[in-house]
Image (spheres, rainbow, N blue to C red):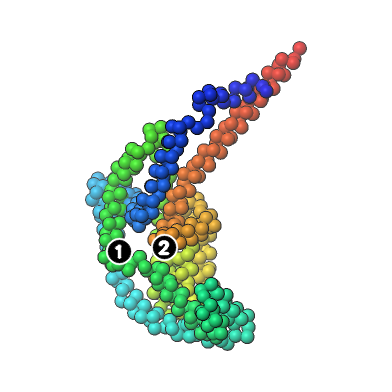
Amino acid sequence: MSTLDHDLLPAPLPPERRGWRTADVARASIVVLAVWFGLQLLWSVSSLVFLVFLATLFGLAVGRGVDVLARFRIRRGIASALIVLGTLGAIGGVLAWTAPTLIEQGKQLQTAFPDAVHKLQTWVDSTRSGFVGRLISSAPASATAAAGSERTAADSTAAPSEAIRQRITTALGGASRYLFSFVSNTLAAATAFVLMVFLAMYIGAEPEVYRGWLLSVVPATSRAEVRLVLSGIATVLRKWLVTQMIAMLVIGSVSMVVLLLLGVKAAFALAFIAGLCEFIPTVGPVLSAVPAILMGFVDSPEKALAVLVAYWGIQFLENNLLIPYLMRGEMDLPPAITLVAQSLMTLLFGFVGLMVAVPLTAAVLVPLRMMAVREDAREQAMRAADAAGRAAAETTAAGGATP
């Protein structure tokens, strides 16, 4: 072994420092218990944690607007209130302006929906002898096998049209409970909304104050790195929220134009649903396409197919042109990680977990990426130092061998 390699080896530990001592075991046990109790506490107040996270997400966007207004010597608290209340007023004004159309087309959608289901049943019955009929008639038996022997026997003998009716009714009932269970208590939902608005207002007014509180519990030796991590998380979350807001407007507008061109009924209401569902990446566009496709069946299966192709084309252009242009590499979430995070958060926390799954995953990936970049830089530096050491050793050896 060369002298250089010997110098790089760590010094051996003294005998009294080898292995785990009683104090080390006690400290590790305390850390494990603290982490366990902390996770239990977070689980019990998960709704409040997600509420604070959403308020922080909106507060970061408000803070950027406050920074702009502060240049005109407007106090940050007043600027934050103006932005939040002005945004709520604008949204309320748009809703009030479009409320008659939404109500009218909502009633039209509610009335035409059973007709759409009937047209779908008729189309399936007409293709009973084909591949679609065999596929749908065999699907209920396999899908309900785990639900119990009684339902299995009933569904296996059902006609394709009756099976479709049962499946759609069950799916819509489940989606209704799944999507709107968190607003079953109106008072609690209104209180949560008001709390989120005020939290976003306070965080947007003085983000450095709350960042300072977070840094105060971090050891002084790690505060610089944690500050960089918090800054990176804030940038990614702000960029994600702005991107989603723009995407909601664009997708809602484009969907309305496309549905009007295709002659689909209740185009404005369906486009409004598409814009709202756009806030939930990956899953939201699929949910918004289902009622539009069913409404296409009111006229013909060909129109339903055209709606399906149109929605697919809109999502293709969004994922490959709009979102990459808006994000510009700030947050590149792999689709597999996004789907796994959304599924896991939905199973654990329901619809609220689905809403925060993507931004929360983006926030968690920020420090992981920073650690990966730092490790890559450290590895490259070690390789460069090793190469320099070898070159110096070869030069020294060559000089000593020269007569």
Q: Is residue 148 left or right of residue 82?
A: right
Mark-to-mark CA distance, 2 and 1 = 15 Å
Residue 54 seen in render: no
Label 1 crowd bin: few (<14), some (14–19), many (20+), radius 10 Å: few
Considering the numbered disc 2 on the image, is that residue within a helix, a strand or a loop? loop
Instruction: In the rendered view, tell whether residue 7 sits above or below residue 145.
Output: above
Q: Quadrant of residue 220?
A: top left
Q: Amino acid at mark 1?
A: Ala
Q: Amino acid at mark 2?
A: Gly
Q: Position of residue 270 (x, y in %)?
A: 42, 74
Residue 154 in percent (x, y) is at 52, 83
For residue 200, side relative to residue 304 (left or right): left
Labels 2, 1: front one: 2
Residue annotated with mark 1: 189
Taking the spot 35% from the left edge, 65% from the top edge, the residue there is: 182
Q: In the rendered image, which quarter contains the C terminus?
A: top right
Circle nearer the N terminus (2, 1) = 1
| Disc sitting over residue 350 in the figure | 2
- The correct choice, above or below, for 251 with respect to 2 in the image is below
Q: Is residue 18 above or below residue 164?
A: above
User: In the picture provided, is 137 more to the left or to the right than 217?
Assistant: right
